[in-house]
Image: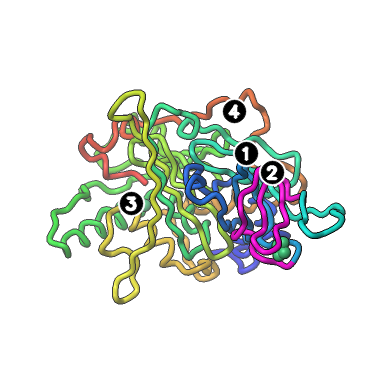
Amino acid sequence: MLTEERNRRMTETGPGTPGGDFLRRYWFPIAAVSELDKEPVQPIRLLGESLTLFRSLKGGLGLIAERCAHRLLPLMYGIPHESGLRCAYHGWIYDTEGTVVERPFEPTCPPLKVTSYPVEALGGLVFAYLGPEPRPLLPRWEAFIRDDLDRKMSFTPLPCNYVQCMDNSMDPVHFEYLHGHYGNYLLGLRDEPPAFNTASAHVKIDFDVADHGLIYKRRLLTGESEDGDDWTIGHPIVFPYMLASPTGSLGFQIRVPVDDTHTMHINYTTSQPKESGNPTEVIEHTELEVDSWGRVNRSAGIVVPQDMMAWVGQGPVMDRTKEYLATSDKGVVLYHKLLLDNIDKVGRGEDPFGVIRDGAKNEMLEIKKTTTEREGFNIPGALRGRA
Ligand code: FES
Ligand SMILES: [Fe+2]
């Protein structure tokens, strides 16, 4: 259980809030690069700020204010120009830094600049940084920098705070019930055979905090040896907003804080190309499915939709003054402590956990993998203890 004040401090995302200042020390993905080919001007909402992403005709990427400084037309209606973005209303042109570089009809063009933020492309995604300079490095995770893999990015908007998604990733025990027992129950309702081995139960869980924001969650199930890599290595979370893909591929579930009550979930997965040397890319946009009683995703697929049910079901911002934390919540407690400690660190002017500034450490960031993650779900019982 948290106080109302601590829960707010931990879940706020907007500018000028301690939680928002903390999040503004990290880069976040905001769009798929390839989608700028068909829609080079896109409205973006990130950390409680409404913005405009565009690609100029010369290929420069800009992330600037939501509205034109002249008469406040949304710049999402703009026209890409050689030197930036032309407002649709009276033709003022903004460069990628947000500076007005042309004002048709006006005899003079005194200095005028709107909000702008740095963006970088990596792994087929556009990343944005909304914090103070000097900006940290954009982390070069292996999944993002490998160009020899097929990539799939699935974007799903969620009506809940990002911390709920991350709490769930720091909670190994839920797999046994939300995915195992509940998953089999839902499959039974559809007259489908059970997909989960529910014979094993969790015996113990633990967590290791490593470098670059990595936190490994470890679990031991009945019948497993302590020498097994589910216990000796575990499965990684990247603080504060990603879970490494549990599907045997390099990738992440990325929880982008849109604002206090919305999250953009990006399921970023990779696989070996069927034809070597010819990697493909798939972009998907999906919506939460809701049944006639308003329940999320009972008829949808297994695992990730069940997690989404849990995240969204806890409310727009979960009221943690009313929860009853138990032994299984060891990881949730650790994650909240890390959030609150790192919010304090940012308040003292220090870098929070996971921020990287040393280029030598950022050539390629790797994650330790268990046998299941190396070999995928084909090994027996692999669905028992992931995610
Ligand atoms: S409102 Fe944008 S140029 Fe007038
Ligand atoms: Fe899960």
Q: Are marks 2 and 1 in contact (CB under 8 Å)?
A: yes
Provide the residue designation for mark 4: 362
Closer to the chain start, of discs 4 and 3, is: 3
Question: Which mark is nearer the camera, 2 or 4?
Answer: 2
**Amino acid of disc 4:** Asn
Magenta-tinted stretch: 71-100
Closer to the chain start, of discs 2 and 1, is: 1
Closer to the chain start, of discs 2 and 4, is: 2
User: Badge 3: few (under 14), some or many (20 or more) residues near its Cα, within 10 Å?
Assistant: many
> How far, Cα to Cα, is label 4 from label 1?
29 Å
Is disc 3 placed on a helix, strand or loop? helix
The picture quadrant where one finds residue 385 is top left
**Amino acid of disc 2:** Ser
Q: Is 56 covered by the magenta stretch?
A: no
Does mark 3's beta carbon lie closer than 8 Å to ligand 2?
yes
Q: Position of residue 207 (x, y in %)?
A: 47, 41
> How far, Cα to Cα, is label 4 from label 3?
32 Å
- Can residue 49 be seen in the rendering of this structure? no
Instruction: In the rendered structure, find residue 58 and report the number of the disc placed on it.
Output: 1
Provide the residue designation for mark 3: 175
Query: Residue, x 31% and y 63% (percent of image)?
Result: 297
Tell me if 273 is positioned left or right of 44 in this view.
Answer: left
Up-down relation of residue 87 to residue 315 (above or below): above
Closer to the chain start, of discs 4 and 1, is: 1
